[in-house]
Amino acid sequence: MQEDTTYSIKDMEREFGLTLRTLRYYEERGLVRPVRRGALRVYSAKDRERLKLITRFKALGFALVEVKEIVELLEAPRGRRKNLHGLRSRLSEQRELLREQCRELEKVLELMEETLTEVNGEITAQDDGNLHGG
Protein backbone atom coordinates (compact mmCIF):
# COMPACT_ATOMS: atom_id res chain seq x y z
CA MET A 1 0.00 0.00 0.00
CA GLN A 2 1.42 3.34 -1.00
CA GLU A 3 1.06 6.38 1.21
CA ASP A 4 -0.59 8.40 -1.59
CA THR A 5 -3.21 5.75 -2.41
CA THR A 6 -6.74 7.03 -1.92
CA TYR A 7 -10.08 5.30 -1.44
CA SER A 8 -13.70 6.26 -1.95
CA ILE A 9 -16.39 5.94 0.69
CA LYS A 10 -17.73 2.98 -1.32
CA ASP A 11 -14.30 1.31 -1.13
CA MET A 12 -14.32 1.71 2.66
CA GLU A 13 -17.91 0.50 2.88
CA ARG A 14 -17.05 -2.68 0.94
CA GLU A 15 -13.74 -3.42 2.63
CA PHE A 16 -14.90 -2.97 6.22
CA GLY A 17 -18.56 -3.92 5.90
CA LEU A 18 -19.65 -0.55 7.26
CA THR A 19 -22.64 1.43 6.10
CA LEU A 20 -22.28 4.87 4.55
CA ARG A 21 -24.12 6.20 7.59
CA THR A 22 -21.58 4.62 9.95
CA LEU A 23 -18.65 6.01 7.98
CA ARG A 24 -20.19 9.48 8.07
CA TYR A 25 -20.79 9.09 11.81
CA TYR A 26 -17.12 8.15 12.33
CA GLU A 27 -16.20 11.27 10.37
CA GLU A 28 -18.49 13.44 12.55
CA ARG A 29 -16.82 11.97 15.65
CA GLY A 30 -13.35 12.75 14.31
CA LEU A 31 -12.30 9.12 13.96
CA VAL A 32 -11.49 9.51 10.27
CA ARG A 33 -10.83 12.66 8.31
CA PRO A 34 -11.43 12.10 4.62
CA VAL A 35 -10.59 15.00 2.33
CA ARG A 36 -13.57 16.53 0.57
CA ARG A 37 -13.42 16.97 -3.18
CA GLY A 38 -16.73 18.58 -3.94
CA ALA A 39 -19.37 16.16 -2.69
CA LEU A 40 -16.90 13.25 -2.64
CA ARG A 41 -15.05 11.96 0.40
CA VAL A 42 -11.54 10.77 -0.36
CA TYR A 43 -9.98 8.49 2.24
CA SER A 44 -6.21 8.28 2.66
CA ALA A 45 -4.09 5.25 3.48
CA LYS A 46 -3.98 6.59 7.06
CA ASP A 47 -7.80 6.72 7.19
CA ARG A 48 -7.88 3.13 5.95
CA GLU A 49 -5.46 2.01 8.67
CA ARG A 50 -7.54 3.86 11.25
CA LEU A 51 -10.69 2.08 10.03
CA LYS A 52 -8.89 -1.25 10.45
CA LEU A 53 -8.17 -0.34 14.07
CA ILE A 54 -11.65 1.05 14.66
CA THR A 55 -13.40 -2.06 13.35
CA ARG A 56 -11.06 -4.34 15.33
CA PHE A 57 -11.59 -2.57 18.65
CA LYS A 58 -15.35 -2.21 18.05
CA ALA A 59 -15.46 -5.98 17.39
CA LEU A 60 -13.64 -6.48 20.71
CA GLY A 61 -16.54 -4.75 22.44
CA PHE A 62 -15.08 -1.33 23.14
CA ALA A 63 -17.37 1.71 23.07
CA LEU A 64 -16.68 4.20 20.28
CA VAL A 65 -15.32 6.76 22.76
CA GLU A 66 -12.84 4.15 24.00
CA VAL A 67 -11.97 3.16 20.43
CA LYS A 68 -11.10 6.77 19.63
CA GLU A 69 -8.87 6.99 22.71
CA ILE A 70 -7.13 3.71 21.84
CA VAL A 71 -6.52 4.70 18.22
CA GLU A 72 -5.13 8.06 19.30
CA LEU A 73 -2.88 6.32 21.84
CA LEU A 74 -1.56 3.97 19.17
CA GLU A 75 -0.87 6.86 16.80
CA ALA A 76 0.76 9.11 19.40
CA PRO A 77 4.32 9.93 18.34
CA ARG A 78 5.66 9.82 21.90
CA GLY A 79 5.43 7.33 24.74
CA ARG A 80 4.80 4.30 22.54
CA ARG A 81 5.97 1.80 25.18
CA LYS A 82 3.84 3.41 27.90
CA ASN A 83 0.87 3.54 25.54
CA LEU A 84 1.25 -0.14 24.68
CA HIS A 85 1.30 -1.03 28.37
CA GLY A 86 -1.88 1.00 28.84
CA LEU A 87 -3.47 -0.74 25.89
CA ARG A 88 -2.49 -4.15 27.24
CA SER A 89 -4.17 -3.27 30.53
CA ARG A 90 -7.37 -2.13 28.77
CA LEU A 91 -7.40 -5.27 26.64
CA SER A 92 -7.02 -7.47 29.72
CA GLU A 93 -9.90 -5.66 31.44
CA GLN A 94 -12.05 -6.03 28.33
CA ARG A 95 -11.18 -9.73 28.08
CA GLU A 96 -12.35 -10.26 31.66
CA LEU A 97 -15.56 -8.33 30.97
CA LEU A 98 -16.22 -10.50 27.90
CA ARG A 99 -15.57 -13.66 29.93
CA GLU A 100 -18.06 -12.50 32.54
CA GLN A 101 -20.61 -11.82 29.81
CA CYS A 102 -20.00 -15.35 28.49
CA ARG A 103 -20.65 -16.80 31.93
CA GLU A 104 -23.87 -14.80 32.18
CA LEU A 105 -24.95 -15.95 28.72
CA GLU A 106 -24.26 -19.58 29.68
CA LYS A 107 -26.62 -19.16 32.66
CA VAL A 108 -29.29 -17.65 30.42
CA LEU A 109 -28.88 -20.49 27.92
CA GLU A 110 -29.27 -23.06 30.70
CA LEU A 111 -32.47 -21.36 31.82
CA MET A 112 -33.65 -21.33 28.19
CA GLU A 113 -33.03 -25.09 27.90
CA GLU A 114 -34.94 -25.75 31.15
CA THR A 115 -37.82 -23.60 29.98
CA LEU A 116 -37.95 -25.27 26.56
CA THR A 117 -37.93 -28.69 28.22
CA GLU A 118 -40.84 -27.64 30.45
CA VAL A 119 -42.81 -26.24 27.51
CA ASN A 120 -42.15 -29.37 25.44
CA GLY A 121 -43.35 -31.46 28.39
CA GLU A 122 -46.55 -29.41 28.58
CA ILE A 123 -47.11 -29.83 24.84
CA THR A 124 -46.59 -33.58 25.10
CA ALA A 125 -48.98 -33.76 28.06
CA GLN A 126 -51.59 -31.77 26.11
CA ASP A 127 -51.15 -34.01 23.04
CA ASP A 128 -51.46 -37.15 25.20
CA GLY A 129 -54.58 -35.74 26.83
CA ASN A 130 -56.14 -35.03 23.44
CA LEU A 131 -55.34 -38.56 22.25
CA HIS A 132 -57.08 -40.06 25.28
CA GLY A 133 -60.24 -38.04 25.02
CA GLY A 134 -59.08 -35.09 27.14
Image: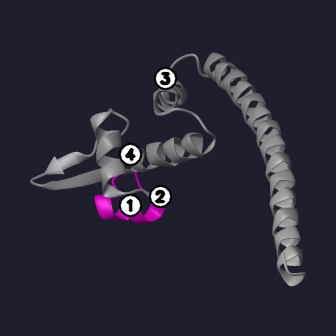
| Quadrant of image for the C terminus | bottom right
Instruction: Name the element at disc 3.
Output: loop
The residue carrying mark 2 is 16
The residue carrying mark 3 is 77
Q: Position of residue 53 (x, y in %)?
A: 53, 42
Q: Quadrant of residue 91?
A: top right
Work out whether residue 7 can be spotted: no
Q: Earlier in the sequence, mark 1 or mark 4?
A: 1
Do residues under tags 2 and 1 come within 8 Å of each other at their CB atoms?
Answer: yes
- 1 left or right, relative to 117: left
Q: Quadrant of residue 10?
A: bottom left
Q: Earlier in the sequence, mark 4 or mark 3?
A: 4
Residue type at numbered disc 2: Phe
Q: Give the CA distance from mark 1 to mark 3.
A: 29 Å
Do residues under tags 4 and 2 come within 8 Å of each other at their CB atoms?
Answer: no
Q: Position of residue 61 (x, y in %)?
A: 61, 38
The residue carrying mark 1 is 13
The residue carrying mark 4 is 47
Q: Give the CA distance from mark 1 to mark 4.
A: 13 Å
Do residues under tags 1 and 3 come within 8 Å of each other at their CB atoms?
Answer: no
Q: Which mark is residue 130?
A: none
Q: Position of residue 28 (x, y in %)?
A: 27, 36
Please report the bounds of the magenta region as a residue range.
2-15
